[in-house]
Image: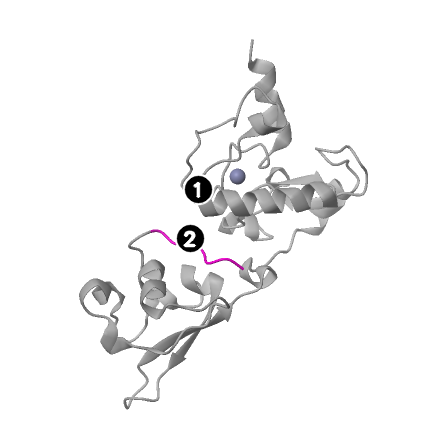
Amino acid sequence: MEEPNFKVGSMPYLFVKLAKPDKDGVSRWVSKNEFVGEYAPLMFQNGASWCRAESTIAKYYYVEFDKSITPGNGVDRIRLNGYKPEEERMGSQTIRADIKKYYKEKRCVILGTSNPEVDHKNGYKNNARVMSISSQKLEDFQPLSKAANDAKRQFCKECEKTRKRYDATLLGYPISWYKGNEEHDGTAHGCEGCFWYDPIEFRKHLMKKD
Ligand SMILES: [Zn+2]
């Protein structure tokens, strides 16, 4: 697992800079007393909202708290105790049964082969609506063969890290992406506009070219 690409100056960015986790994502215990100067934004009273269970940093790392130094229930020290495996990082990977069934009978949108996997178009899986069974929609997903899905996963990882869309001219297409430009902000829509995000939508934009 590579170090996540936190926004410069954000809370997770600051904490990682201060805690300096090793290659496995394990850091020393960092005392609250160190949250001064450049790191002052990390200071909190009781609840440390920037490293709670739903926080960005806790999506990537196991975050541990030590409350044993001072009396009371406040957090005294925090450490990162390793990278979360991808399955866990993504939270609920669940795709509703009717959606799964629908796409299982379709063919891979890239290779045309049968018995596809059901792919989240948003490869970052960072959109709460899509990750929740009750609010996800058919069009949030697409059928991809294992081979295509494995390839997509690699390209999405790169795209999420660099915040640059995959350039489809590398595959010989006349356009690079169908929405936005090279840079994307990596927010809740992932990198919509990438070839890998939605190959069928991508091809529709090819038809519009003269
Ligand atoms: Zn992308």
Could you tell me residue 31's position as x and y percent? 29, 78
Label 1: which secondary element: loop
Where is residue 184 drawn, in percent x and y?
Answer: 42, 37
Q: What amino acid is labelled 1 in the image?
A: Arg
Residue 105 part of the magenta segment: no
Q: What range is drawn magenta here?
A: 1-7
Q: Residues within 10 Å of mark 2 (few under 14, many from 20)?
A: few
Q: Is residue 107 left or right of residue 42?
A: right
Query: Which badge, 1 or 2, is on the more N-terminal residue?
Result: 2
Give the number of marks: 2
For label 1, the residue is 163
Q: Count residues near mark 1 (Cα–Cα under 10 Å), then give few for <14, some for 14-19, many for 20+.
A: some
Q: Which mark is residue 5?
A: 2
Label 1 to label 2, Cα distance in Å? 9 Å
Looking at the image, which residue sits at the far top? 210
Percent of width and height locating residue 50? 34, 64
For the C terminus, which image quadrant? top right
Q: Main secondary structure of the magenta part?
A: loop
In-image side of 202 versus 54 (left or right): right
Are the two marked residues, 1 and 2, in contact with CB atoms closer than 8 angstroms?
yes
**Location of residue 29 with respect to 95 vertically, above or below:** below
Residue at image coords 54%, 50%: 125
Q: Is residue 104 above or below residue 94?
A: above
Q: With 17 as the anchor, is 206 left or right in this view?
A: right
